[in-house]
């Protein structure tokens, strides 16, 4: 269980109030530091809970920002962090206000270093998002992700959010209700990469 204390003076529990929180400054909480922000984002049928510790997370990297979920997350995260660094192997267009674009491949050591340099946190959506030959899945989703995490560690990144998939448990019967104690049962090579 994660406990996060929100300021007793002002409730910043809905999207868009990070700006208000930063403007509120030291008066936003009893201890002189704005304590946190909880944000629910609804994407299709997935609800993503984002917890922001404003004092710590000044620059956050979103990998896979050109993919289906990445594009939606990029829009939803606009203004949530002081700087959102977006990355992908695909063209991401022009940077929006508060954004930095770093094009690159998580399989490239030089690109990884540029991606993680100076960030406080990472939301990792990059990689192959559909079934592919095993060699590609292994190179990008497993080895590339591992090496991105290692680069983040070496750069002193404080937090990483890793997006998994329903394919990690896809061999369970559809009607079976699962919880955190159920073991992974991937239904494809892509699902297996999400178990690692």
Image (spheres, rainbow, N blue to C red):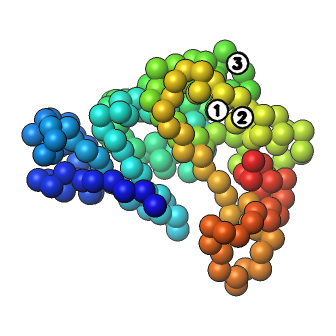
Q: Is residue 155 visible?
A: yes
Cα distance between the residues tagged 3 and 2:
12 Å
In this view, 149 is above or below 167: above
What residue is shown at x 84% (from left), y 53% (from top)?
Answer: 189
Cα distance between the residues tagged 1 and 2:
5 Å
Relative to the observer, which residue lies in front, 55 or 76?
55
In this view, 92 is above or below 114: below
Task: Choose top left, top right, bottom left or bottom right for residue 136.
Answer: top right
Query: Which residue is label 1 attached to?
Result: 149
- Please tell me the numbered disc located at residue 6: none
Q: Position of residue 118 (x, y in %)?
A: 46, 20
Mark 3, Cα crowd under 10 Å, few <14 / some 14-19 / many 20+, is: some
Whether pointer 3 and pointer 2 mark residues with C-beta atoms closer than 8 Å, the reply is no
Cα distance between the residues tagged 1 and 3:
12 Å
What residue is shown at x 77% (from left), y 80% (from top)?
Answer: 173
Whether pointer 1 and pointer 2 mark residues with C-beta atoms closer than 8 Å, the reply is yes
SS type, badge 1: helix
SS type, badge 2: helix
Q: Is residue 92 visible?
A: no
Horizontal relation, residue 10 to residue 104: left or right: left
Query: Which residue is label 2 attached to?
Result: 146
What residue is shown at x 52% (from left), y 68% (from top)?
Answer: 45
Relative to the observer, which residue lies in front, 97 or 126?
126
Mark 2, Cα crowd under 10 Å, few <14 / some 14-19 / many 20+, is: some
Query: Which residue is label 3 attached to?
Result: 109
Horizontal relation, residue 191 to residue 102: left or right: right
């Amino acid at each position: 269980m994660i406990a996060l204390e929100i300021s007793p003076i002002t409730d910043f529990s809905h999207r868009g109030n990070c700006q208000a929180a930063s403007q509120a400054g030291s008066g936003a909480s009893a201890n002189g530091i704005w304590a946190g922000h909880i944000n629910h984002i609804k994407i299709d049928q997935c609800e993503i809970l984002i917890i922001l510790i404003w004092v710590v997370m000044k620059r956050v990297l979103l990998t896979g920002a050109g993919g289906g979920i990445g594009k939606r997350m990029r829009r939803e995260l606009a203004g949530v962090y002081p700087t959102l660094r977006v990355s992908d192997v695909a063209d991401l267009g022009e940077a929006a206000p508060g954004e930095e674009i770093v094009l690159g491949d998580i399989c490239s050591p030089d690109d990884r270093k540029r991606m993680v340099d100076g960030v406080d946190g990472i939301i990792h959506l990059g990689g192959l998002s559909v079934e592919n030959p095993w060699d590609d899945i292994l190179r990008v989703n497993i080895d590339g992700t591992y090496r991105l995490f290692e680069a983040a560690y070496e750069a002193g990144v404080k937090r990483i959010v890793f997006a998994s998939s329903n394919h990690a448990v896809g061999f369970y019967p559809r009607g079976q209700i699962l919880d955190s104690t159920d073991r992974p049962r991937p239904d494809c090579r892509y699902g297996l990469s999400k178990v690692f």
